[in-house]
Image (cartoon, grey):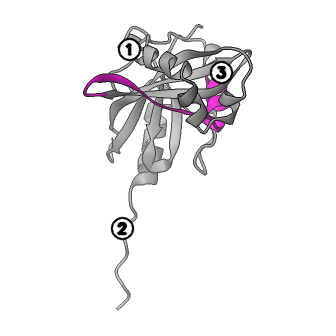
Amino acid sequence: MPLHVPPAPAPALRTVLTALGSPTAVREARTPSLLHSQGPATPELPLPVHVLDELSPAGAAATRLAGWRFLIRCGERSVAAADTMLTPDGWAFSHFFEGPYIASTERALRQAETMGQPYQPRLLSVPSLYMLTLWLHGDCTADGATGHPAATDLLVPLAPAPPGIAAHRPHRVAELLPVLTHRVTPVPLLGSPA
């Protein structure tokens, strides 16, 4: 089934295109693969990046939109990514970056395309666990910039995943959120022996 990639805000895309056209922005970025790539660089697969700020013991998630991420393709492969963020003046380019999450995102998207159900892909960051997941939202007509993970949505942890959580293994939100909640809940200290 094809993925239904939500459209990115046009001003966010324009900021990335402007940054790609700026020799200074590309040169100052810490992305050797982008700097040394051959051929034109094009932003593709815009994904809204949501941040999971809070997990309750019941597993309810509070998320917020942090920006949009574009994979930067040169030739046959993605060599970097570009993040944008919403400012009081509108969408702004944030930065270019590279690393393992680029290939891991592409792998997870290819994996999701083989599933028997259509999904809207998003990214969900869990900063308290240094974790990034591909969030496969079941409502393909939803606004990609809003909403919270539904119990039946899928989360695919991207590599590198935290210890004990398998990368690229899809989990229903209802199954994975309790595990994540347990991971971020502080363990109460026992009283000193008397």
Eye-nearest disc, 2 or 1 = 1
Q: Amino acid at mark 1?
A: Pro
Neighbour tally class for label 3: few under 14, some 14-19, many 20 plus, Cα within 10 Å: some
Q: Are marks 2 and 1 in contact (CB under 8 Å)?
A: no
Q: Amino acid at mark 3?
A: Gln
Was residue 86 drawn as part of the magenta stretch in this picture? Answer: no
Q: Magenta span covers which residues?
A: 87-109
Relative image position of residue 163 (x, y in whole percent): 60, 51
Neighbour tally class for label 2: few under 14, some 14-19, many 20 plus, Cα within 10 Å: few
Q: Which residue is mark 2?
A: 188
Q: Amino acid at mark 2?
A: Pro
Eye-nearest disc, 3 or 1 = 1
Nearest the eye: 38 or 174? 38
Q: Which residue is mark 3?
A: 111
In this view of the protein, can residue 155 be seen by the observer? no
Q: Secondary structure at mark 3?
A: helix
Residue 11 shows which numbered tag? 1
Q: Is residue 86 above or below residue 53?
A: above
Nearest the eye: 100 or 146? 100
Q: For marks 2 and 1, give the CA distance.
A: 47 Å
Nearest the eye: 4 or 36? 36
Q: Residue furthest left?
A: 88
The residue positioned 58% from the left and 22% from the top of the image is 71
The residue positioned 42% from the left and 53% from the top of the image is 184
Q: Are marks 3 and 1 in contact (CB under 8 Å)?
A: no
Q: For marks 3 and 2, give the CA distance.
A: 39 Å
Was residue 106 drawn as part of the magenta stretch in this picture? Answer: yes
Relative image position of residue 53 (x, y in whole percent): 34, 42
Tell me which numbered mark, 2 or 1, is placed earlier along the sequence: 1
Q: Secondary structure at mark 2?
A: loop
